[in-house]
């Protein structure tokens, strides 16, 4: 498959960390039902017992074992899944798989994907679009003005001023890319499996003594690290943590100097994200603050909420007095 750019499209290349938990769950189901990539085998072993115990997953996973991409149509905004299951069965299967196999890992997965996106941003800044495109995946070839996806069959895609969204995925099969769309913009999803060193941090069991992170960096900075599993501006952090903007700026400077977060400025907006080191540090501090049951996943991290057909972000509440001082 080839993606043909106009000059206007080259200026519209964008990056995001993920299509969201729904798409990642579909890719995870594909991976679990087929030959699991080496980087995901520890995860598959951890969740196998819980997955096997869910009767609602037996039929969809058996289908995926025979037709690995049967659910792929769920990822796009206009395509329909070729499952042989009714819509309710399919939605229930994706929801159940997320709850047993991804919910307790989602904050780690999301933080890791944020770090991948930041690395792509650095590649773009250093080497331009050519460096960015050739960094994505071994099967991606760039010869102006065409991006060739060597192992992906299909007709050519001619962009018409929409640009292209680049999206990493932890669970997408390592030898394949996916072209879909998000909010009307074509999107290229590419595999970004963690290295073995980081894989152990992503899938490792939560250690006891989770409050040690707060003891190490302080309650406010521990809560700030946890809040940054989603990108946030300095103002959003201040509001979320119940502290002043000046206080939020001071704490982000400390975390940035410790290489736990990265900071990007676009005009008057400053956005903060976790680094891979920040994600690793969170592995021992998932419970830096108490959470109400409605916003808590099994490892203490906020999980997305199922709305019947898609996942919506868990509701965010100000921490107020819990994080002052």
Image (tube, rainbow, N blue to C red):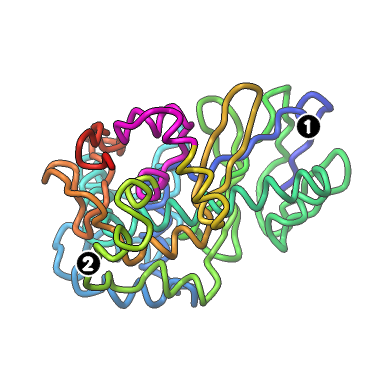
Magenta span includes 238: yes
Q: Residue furthest left?
A: 293
Mark 2 element type: helix
- Label 1: few (<14), some or many (≥20) within 10 Å? some
* Image quadrant in which you'd find residue 125: top right
Mark 1 element type: helix
Mark number, residue 140: none
Mark number, residue 51: 2
**Would you say the residues marked 2 and 1 are in contact, meaning their CB atoms lie under 8 Å apart?**
no
The residue nearer to you, when weighing 66 against 195, is 195
- Range shown magenta: 225-249
Image: 307 above or below 28: above
Q: Earlier in the sequence, mark 2 or mark 1?
A: 1
The residue nearer to you, when weighing 141 against 211, is 211
The residue drawn where x is 53% and y is 65% is 193
The residue at which mark 1 appears reads as 10
The residue drawn where x is 24% and y is 48% is 95
- Label 2: few (<14), some or many (≥20) within 10 Å? many
On screen, residue 294 versus residue 234, left or right, reads: left
Q: Position of residue 79 (x, y in %)?
A: 46, 36
The residue drawn where x is 32% and y is 66% is 284
Q: Position of residue 293 (x, y in %)?
A: 11, 46
On screen, residue 316 versus residue 167, left or right, reads: left
The residue nearer to you, when weighing 312 against 30, is 312
Quarter of the picture containing the C terminus is top left
Magenta span includes 49: no
The residue drawn where x is 57% and y is 31% is 270
On screen, residue 123 versus residue 73, left or right, reads: right
């Amino acid at each position: 498959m080839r993606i043909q750019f106009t000059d206007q499209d080259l200026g519209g290349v964008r990056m995001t960390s993920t299509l969201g938990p729904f798409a990642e769950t579909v890719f995870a189901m594909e991976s679990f039902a087929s030959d699991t990539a080496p980087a995901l085998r520890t995860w598959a072993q951890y969740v196998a017992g819980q997955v096997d115990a869910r009767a609602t997953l037996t039929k969809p996973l058996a289908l995926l074992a025979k037709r690995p991409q049967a659910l792929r149509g769920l990822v796009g905004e206009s395509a329909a899944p070729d499952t042989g299951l009714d819509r309710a069965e399919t939605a229930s299967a994706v929801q159940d798989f997320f709850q047993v196999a991804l919910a307790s890992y989602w904050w780690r997965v999301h933080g890791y994907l944020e770090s991948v996106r930041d690395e792509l941003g650095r590649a773009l800044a250093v080497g331009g679009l050519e460096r960015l495109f050739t960094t994505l995946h071994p099967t991606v070839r760039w010869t102006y003005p065409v991006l060739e996806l060597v192992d992906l069959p299909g007709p050519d895609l001619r962009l018409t001023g929409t640009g292209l969204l680049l999206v990493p995925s932890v669970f997408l099969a390592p030898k394949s890319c996916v072209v879909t769309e998000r909010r009307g913009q074509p999107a290229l999803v590419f595999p970004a499996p963690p290295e073995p060193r980081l894989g152990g941090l992503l899938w490792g069991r939560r250690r006891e003594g989770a409050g040690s992170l707060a003891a190490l960096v302080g309650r406010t900075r521990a809560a700030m690290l946890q809040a940054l599993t989603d990108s946030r501006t300095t103002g959003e952090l201040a509001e979320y943590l119940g502290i002043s903007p000046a206080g939020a700026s001071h704490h982000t400077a400390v975390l940035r100097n410790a290489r736990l977060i990265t900071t990007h400025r676009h005009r008057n907006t400053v956005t903060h994200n976790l680094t891979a080191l920040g994600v690793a540090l969170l592995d021992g501090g998932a419970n830096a603050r108490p959470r109400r049951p409605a916003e808590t996943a099994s490892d203490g991290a906020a999980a997305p909420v199922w709305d019947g057909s898609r996942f919506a972000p868990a509701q965010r509440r100000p921490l107020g007095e819990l994080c002052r001082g």
